[in-house]
Amino acid sequence: MPATRFGRLAAHDPRFVLDLRLGRTPRRDTELRTRAWMQGYSAGAAAEETHAKAGEMA
């Protein structure tokens, strides 16, 4: 996924990843919210993959 899309979805800031690359340190609550979003996204992607594979087998 492009960095700007990730920033918009996870931190509501399209420059989030660029700023991190340039040395920005996020606030603790921003970090926690972003990590929670990543875990949810990962779980959703895994569920979609499992669902797609089950459909292929049927």
Image: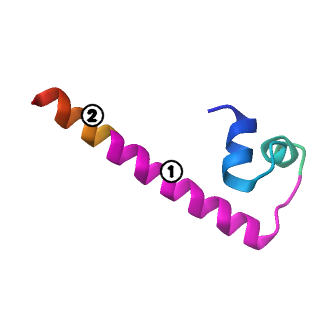
- What is the number of the mark on residue 41? 1
The residue lying furthest to the left in this view is 58
- Image location (x, y in percent) of residue 25: 85, 60
Residues at discs 2 and 1 in contact (Cβ within 8 Å)? no
Instruction: Write the residue at 36% across / 45% down.
Output: 46
Give the residues drawn in magenta, as a range.
24-48
Inspect the image, locate mark 2, and give the three-letter code of the amino acid beneath it.
Answer: Ala
- Dot 2 falls on a residue whose secondary structure is helix
Instruction: Write the residue at 78% across / 44% down.
Output: 17
Instruction: Write the residue at 26% across / 41% down.
Output: 51
- Dot 1 falls on a residue whose secondary structure is helix
Residue 36 located left or right of residue 6: left
- Image location (x, y in percent) of residue 37: 58, 58
- Image location (x, y in percent) of residue 9: 67, 48
Of residues 35 and 40, the one nearer the viewer is: 40
Instruction: Write the residue at 88% across / 54% down.
Output: 24
Q: Is residue 40 above or below residue 50?
A: below
The residue identified by callout 2 is 52
**Tag 1: Cα neighbours inside 10 Å, few (<14), some, or many (≥20)?**
some
Of residues 54 and 20, the one nearer the viewer is: 54
Q: State the CA–CA distance, disc 2 to disc 1.
A: 16 Å
- Image location (x, y in percent) of residue 5: 70, 38
Give the quadrant of the N terminus.
Answer: top right
The residue lying furthest to the top in this view is 56
Give the quadrant of the C terminus.
Answer: top left
Residue 49 located left or right of residue 8: left
Q: Is residue 47 magenta?
A: yes
Q: Earlier in the sequence, mark 2 or mark 1?
A: 1
Inspect the image, locate mark 1, and give the three-letter code of the amino acid beneath it.
Answer: Tyr
